[in-house]
Image: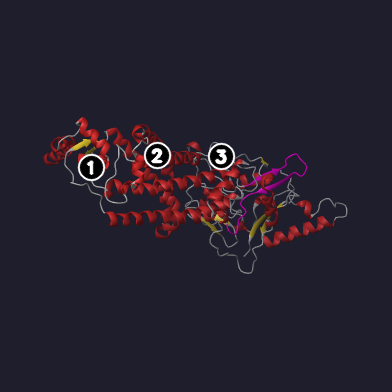
């Protein structure tokens, strides 16, 4: 059993939006719905940083707290999923989520909301693995095939990491140590890697 | 930022809002693992930046898509789940208990000398249609709204998630569809009753005498007494707030962001609950609470003794203008349809 997490390295993300495109393509996501997005702050200025953001699969998820129909559940791998058969499309999870992860397809007039869609950590939904229902509602289920989320797997700079929290923490820690130890690149240190306002 | 100042003001008005931590939840980590989040440090850095990360950009176009983190969402979620559901349940339970106690103490408020049978016209058909349209729409919205607010703690344990999801989905869709009708019927109510609901000289006496709730005697009143006028203005003003906030919530097409939605949602629920609580009192007073009041809204006519007791200044006017009709005349006017129905049932 692992505890699945995403981590985006702000020192590495180059805002290529490949993760966004990969996600849309892999899961056949309709227009207007984006399970992942890249946010750039201080665009074009000194200290510009980009981060790829999707559902962070919180351990104490506010979406699950506020959901009026209790449609969220956490898998054994610590992935927050939801049941679209239960979801009523009220939009409360979008208001509650700090990261803006829940998305709503526009169903009818005045932008009335359809059932919520969000990042599944490429782990499908409550339906049987690889069933046509699961694919239609939640997209592909890569995790059950032993694969990690496609966005992170195909990140060209390896800025976006996904997997067991312990493993990606180790990877990131090693990175930081190497950054700080470089004799030729003192400017990029752990402190600089943090977001500067 | 103005919005954040507003939110801060709201926080100060509601002392629990800023410290809403929620009940301690059991963490269900797989065995032997720490709650280690590699992104924790990065995101707490971002959170502490505050405003400077609010104006990011993103190739993904959408409401708030350039905002990295919206910290107020968690506060709103906890406030909704803890304070709103708890205090609204308490308020609803309390109003029923209070009304029951009032009924035990005062019983049905009668009229000295009983009903005379001689009637006087109080409401036109149009006025009664306006009243009952607003009443039915309001009750429908109140029930569907309460299902969405209190359903998870109260109804899911009873019906299970699948059945409740159907009910909640129907509630949400119909609440959204019927909602705008509330504004329409509210405006009809505003225009058809506004002239008689403007406060006048005698109203203060009504308030000073406790509106007849305290003590025995009836208090002097015009066509509407001060209590009824106040209820009217509560309906109109709070009703308008509920309507406008509802329209903001139901149509996310004006680019309103999450912080606006959170504040508007809290205002919508608190105002709607206030209306529901007071309306229960109104329903009691209009039906079981006082003798002869329901007739006015049922048939449009009230007993002249009722008018003299509750609205003596209007009653006096009715006497002077000779507007009173006899019991037989009243039967003919109001009872016609029921007589016809009875005849019809005989022949078929």
Q: Secondary structure at mark 1?
A: helix
Query: B322 or B251, which lies in front?
Result: B322
Q: For mark 2, does the 10 Å Cα neighbourhood hold few (<14), some (14 to 19), or many (20 or more) residues? A: some
Closest to the camera, between mark 1 and mark 2, is: 1
Task: Please identify the quadrant where the N terminus of chain A is shown.
Answer: bottom right
Residue B176, quarter of picture: top left
Q: In this orientation, does residue B327 appear?
A: yes
Disc marking residue B233: 2
Question: Which residue in the protein does label 3 denote?
Answer: B256
Identify which residue is drawn at 19% across, 37% down: B119
Position of B260 with respect to B211 (left or right) is right
Position of B112 with respect to B147 (left or right) is left
Rounded to the nearest angstrom, the CA distance separating label 3 from label 1 is 51 Å
Q: Secondary structure at mark 2?
A: helix
The image position of residue B301, as x and y in percent, is 22, 37
Q: Earlier in the sequence, mark 3 or mark 1?
A: 3
Identify which residue is drawn at 78% across, 54% down: A191
Q: Chain of mark 3?
A: B
Q: Which residues are magenta?
A: A36-60
Q: Earlier in the sequence, mark 2 or mark 3?
A: 2
Q: Are marks 2 and 3 on the same chain?
A: yes
Rounded to the nearest angstrom, the CA distance separating label 2 from label 3 is 29 Å
Q: Chain of mark 2?
A: B
């Amino acid at each position: 059993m692992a505890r699945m997490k995403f981590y985006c390295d702000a020192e590495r993300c180059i805002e290529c939006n490949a993760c966004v495109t990969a996600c849309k393509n892999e899961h056949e996501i309709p227009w207007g719905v984006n399970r992942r997005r890249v946010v750039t702050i201080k665009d074009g200025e000194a200290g510009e940083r980009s981060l790829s953001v999707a559902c962070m699969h919180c351990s104490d998820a506010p979406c699950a707290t506020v959901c009026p129909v209790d449609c969220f559940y956490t898998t054994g791998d610590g992935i927050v999923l939801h049941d679209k058969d239960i979801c009523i499309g009220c939009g409360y999870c979008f208001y509650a989520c700090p990261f803006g992860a829940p998305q709503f397809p526009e169903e009818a007039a005045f932008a009335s909301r359809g059932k919520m869609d969000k990042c599944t950590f490429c782990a499908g939904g409550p339906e049987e693995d690889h069933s046509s229902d699961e694919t239609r509602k939640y997209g592909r289920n890569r995790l059950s095939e032993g694969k990690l989320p496609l966005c992170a797997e195909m990140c060209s700079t390896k800025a976006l990491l996904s997997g067991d929290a312990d493993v990606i923490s180790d990877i990131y820690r090693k990175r930081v140590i190497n950054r700080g130890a470089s004799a030729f690149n003192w400017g990029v240190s752990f402190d600089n890697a943090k977001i500067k306002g | 930022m103005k919005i954040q100042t507003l939110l801060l003001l709201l926080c100060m008005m509601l002392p629990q809002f800023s410290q809403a931590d929620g009940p301690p939840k059991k963490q269900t980590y797989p065995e032997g693992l720490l709650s280690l989040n590699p992104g924790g440090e990065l995101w707490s850095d971002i959170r502490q930046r505050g405003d400077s990360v609010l104006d990011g950009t993103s190739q993904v176009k959408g409401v708030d898509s350039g905002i990295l983190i919206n910290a107020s969402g968690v506060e709103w979620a906890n406030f909704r789940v803890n304070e709103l559901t708890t205090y609204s349940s308490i308020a609803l339970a309390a109003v029923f208990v209070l009304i029951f106690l009032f009924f035990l103490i005062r019983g049905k408020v009668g009229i000295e000398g009983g009903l005379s049978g001689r009637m006087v016209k109080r409401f036109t058909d149009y006025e009664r249609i306006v009243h009952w349209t607003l009443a039915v729409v309001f009750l429908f919205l109140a029930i569907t709204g309460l299902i969405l607010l209190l359903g998870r703690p109260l109804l899911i344990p009873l019906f299970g998630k699948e059945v409740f999801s159907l009910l909640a989905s129907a509630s949400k869709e119909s609440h959204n569809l019927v909602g705008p009708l509330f504004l329409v019927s509210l405006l009809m109510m505003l225009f058809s009753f506004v002239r008689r609901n403007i406060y006048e000289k005698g109203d203060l006496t009504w308030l000073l005498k406790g509106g007849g709730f305290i003590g025995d005697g009836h208090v002097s009143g015009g066509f509407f007494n001060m209590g009824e006028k106040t209820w009217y203005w509560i309906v109109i003003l709070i009703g308008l707030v509920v309507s406008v906030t509802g329209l903001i919530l139901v149509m996310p097409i004006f680019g309103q962001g999450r912080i606006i939605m959170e504040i508007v949602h809290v205002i919508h629920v608190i105002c709607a609950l206030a209306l529901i609580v007071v309306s229960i009192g109104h329903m009691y007073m209009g039906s079981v609470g006082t003798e002869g009041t329901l007739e006015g809204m049922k048939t449009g006519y009230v007993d002249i003794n009722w008018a003299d007791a509750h609205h003596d200044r209007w009653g006096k006017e009715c006497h002077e203008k000779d507007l009173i009709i006899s019991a037989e005349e009243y039967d003919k006017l109001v009872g016609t349809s029921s007589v016809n129905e009875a005849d019809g049932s005989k022949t078929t």
